[in-house]
Image (cartoon, grey):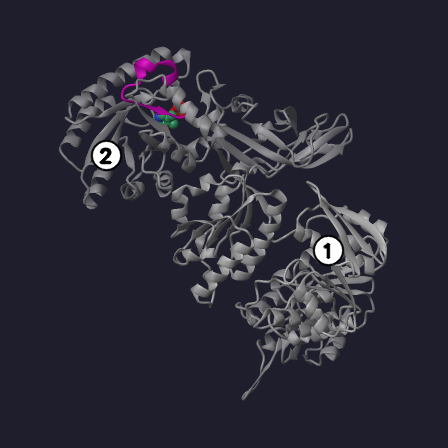
Amino acid sequence: MSYSIEQITELTGATRIGKVEATIDWLLTENTQLSFPEETLYFAIPDKQNGEEKIIADLYARGVRNFVVEVKNTWLGNAAPVNYADYPACNFLEVSNALKTLQKLVEKHRSNYHIPMIGVTGSTGKTIVKEWLYQLLSQDRIVARSPYTSNGQIGVPLSVWQINDQSQLAIIEAKSLESGEMRALQSIIQPTIGVFTSIGRTSQERFSSLQEKCEEALGLFKDCDVIIYNGDDEFIRDSVGKSLFSAREIAWSRVDTDKPLFITSVKKGDTSAEITYQYLGMENSYCFPFTDDISINYSINCLAVCLYLMLPPEEITARMAKLRPIASRLELKNGKRGCVLIDDSYDLDINTLEAALEFQYRHAENKKMEKTLILSDILDTDKAPNVLYKRVGQLLDEHGITRLIAVGRELASAASRFEMKCDFFPDTDALFASGVMQLLNHEIVLIKGARTFNFERIVDYLELKDRDTVLKVNLNALINNLNYFRNKLLPTTRTLCMVKAGAYGAGAVEVSKALRDEKVDYLGVATADQGVEIREAGVTTSIIVTNPIHSSLKKIFRYSLEAEIYNFRILEEIIHSAEREGMMNVPIHIKVNTGMNRMGFDVAELPMLIRKLKEQNTVIPRSIFSHLAGSDGKEFDEFTHQQIALFDKVSSEFQAAFSHRILRHIANSAAVERFPELAQFDMVRLGIGLYGVNPCDNSIINNVSTLQSTIIQLRDVAEGETVGYSRRGKIVKPTRIAVLRIGYGDGLDRHLGNGNFYCLVNGQKAPYVGNICMDLCMIDVTGIACREGDKAVIFGDDLPVTMLADQLGTIPYEVLTNMLPRVKRVYIRE
Ligand SMILES: *Cc1c(COP(=O)(O)O)cnc(C)c1O
């Protein structure tokens, strides 16, 4: 339905500034929702933090030319929010109240239509009932309805505006927050069929009584032809009775046979419920795919509407069976250890708490799970804490919360209000430190926190992430690999675990924590920043930084990292910096070059190094070490033996020059595997082996990392067609192509494309087809039973990373470290 700007001016009684021709199809109140600038009329409703002027400027730049603005009468004359001269070729409609103008315009729009209009209100279930009615009724008529949950003073007019000449029915939900609001909504909606979903016993903050709240809601039904409600709810029944409507009533009841719609029986199965009812002397029944009482009550409201609209009972039965759950702001996520999570970690007030509790309540009933709530202090409130938390306590009782994990000092001081099992923590960090979240098991966990508590961290921690492109890291396998190497060593030999390059791609922080718990002696990183990241995660294990540079020394001191010293320049720099910081005995690790010819002091430099070290006490050598160039290859064994022998000699001379114990180390994973006796010295440095790859023969010890992605589209491609960029994927026989949500932007090497390698889909080989793209790749799944959403293993369990490396002509180290940070790491630990 289009209106000319003249018509709108007339309907609203506004004063029009500007003479531009315009046709208006869209009304807008949020600048984020702009789609059709030329046909949009923007209502500058004050009460926005951003300021109307900025929004108008933004919308103007994006092509909007029609604006409704409020002008205030001041003693200087009328004050407009913007200077019209700055906005040429526009229409400004001046009004005294933009919201009222919006409502008035839509009211006039509404009165052009004579179609059944369903108005839905109540404390809970409005959106579900509206959406289910839509699912039930839209099969044979064109239905306009409120988008998602818009039901307030702005949402309702914008919803009703969507009614047009095609509409045969409309379903609009309405909610009043304060007394008097419903009257305005009623005159915009003018419903002919009223549905009252429920009245909350609990939440009437802004109403002086439940009575008043109920009467306010009933205001929507003033001129309805019929009112539908739960006749077993005494309160609603009495309030409707007192309201003296002339409307017909369809009260339904599960106990009172005299009610117009009598529910004879409700039989609940595992996944569906069967409801038998009597209406106008006839008995019928329907099955529907929900089993909780709350959903059953909502479905009965819908049933009553369908019956009133004279939908044949067989049709009702058929359609009820197909009802789908509605999308909610809240969603269920799979958590670890069989938990189900409800993530509402972004905002918290008492109303959203109640809504979230209801959501949890319904879903817990379906799944018969214990109900746990992780809740923060409710910050954003003008209520006194004692009143507030008393209410919270009641709400938790009503919704059957069995366990409360409370974060914040206010909750802790209100501890006596909560009768269920409780744990209190002063802040989110304390909750993490306590380990209680690791004990959550097969519970439905609602996570509800005020923004400042950063509860998204909790969700991230508890969520089971297996739906996307993820690198699954099995920490148990990592520990098994550590023990595999430890078993080759003397019990006294220390371990330095290399966690450089994000722990070879597995994620430095989690891997470091796991290794700390195994009491490894050192962690090794390449740069100071990597060390800082691990320290900031609370890991206190000693950390060696192998490639320090001058500018990173301060960080090394501040975070108690230990630097590898590889030449005289960096030695001077660290001594100088440490002196300036007033430090003494800063531990350092001396690197000697025994043949690798990469980093380190030459053997000939050692006497001078010893002298320099001995004439100061700012730094102190903690270890001396060297690195083997070919410990993994038999062909280099002679050279390796020479390196080890040379290191043995020079490192013992070095030790002899000092009275304190200096650790000597040279072995990497391959050397521990191949020369455990000869090369272990005081400590070994484990890298690739920890991550599951035996560098000597490329076998897998215990697989740690599995890279998997998801099929997001399937299609059949005919012979003669091509797939992907540059038409490289030539199809020679009918082929089923799956698209995976991973590409070279995640670290998937382009050289694998064009049939050079394959991934595994449900255990079967699916070759890459055509060029690998930035975010996607295509694979051939012809003959493989698979569906969209199925996983594909790029490497890992059942497809060793070493095979991928061989195909690419590289080493597994590179494949592992090429996984970019945007690939989520998910940690598995039994
Ligand atoms: C990376 C690294 C290691 C570990 O080597 P792997 O072959 O992965 O076992 C050992 N020492 C140094 C100095 C390293 O940089």
> Tags 1 and 2 in contact by the CB under 8 Å rule?
no
Residue sitting at the far bottom: 75
Horizontal relation, residue 792 to residue 586: left or right = right
Element type at marker 2? strand
Residue at the location (57% across, 71% down)? 52
Amino acid of disc 1: Arg
Circle 2: is it few (<14), some (14-19), or many (20+) Cα within 10 Å?
some
Amino acid of disc 2: Pro
Residue at the location (33% across, 30% down)? 519
The quarter holding residue 790 reads top right
State the residue in front, 738 or 135.
Answer: 135
The quarter holding residue 789 reads top right
Horizontal relation, residue 12 to residue 363: left or right = right
User: What residue would you read off at disc 1?
Assistant: 254
Instruction: Residue 284 in the image: state x and y as whole percent.
Output: 82, 50
Q: Is residue 278 visible?
A: yes
Q: Is residue 686 magenta?
A: yes
Instruction: Residue 705 in the image: state x and y as whole percent.
Output: 50, 29
Structural distance between the alpha carbons of marks 1 and 2? 79 Å
Answer with the quadrant where ligand 1 appears in the image. Answer: top left
**In the rendering, which numbered label is found on residue 712?**
none
State the residue in front, 35 or 799.
Answer: 799
Instruction: Residue 498 in the image: state x and y as whole percent.
Output: 37, 29
> Where is 480 relative to 320, above or below?
above
State the residue in front, 765 or 107.
Answer: 107
> Where is 519 relative to 167, above or below?
above
User: What are the residue bounds of the magenta stretch?
Assistant: 671-688
**In the rendering, which numbered label is found on residue 587?**
2
Element type at marker 1? loop
Instruction: Residue 330 in the image: state x and y as whole percent.
Output: 59, 51
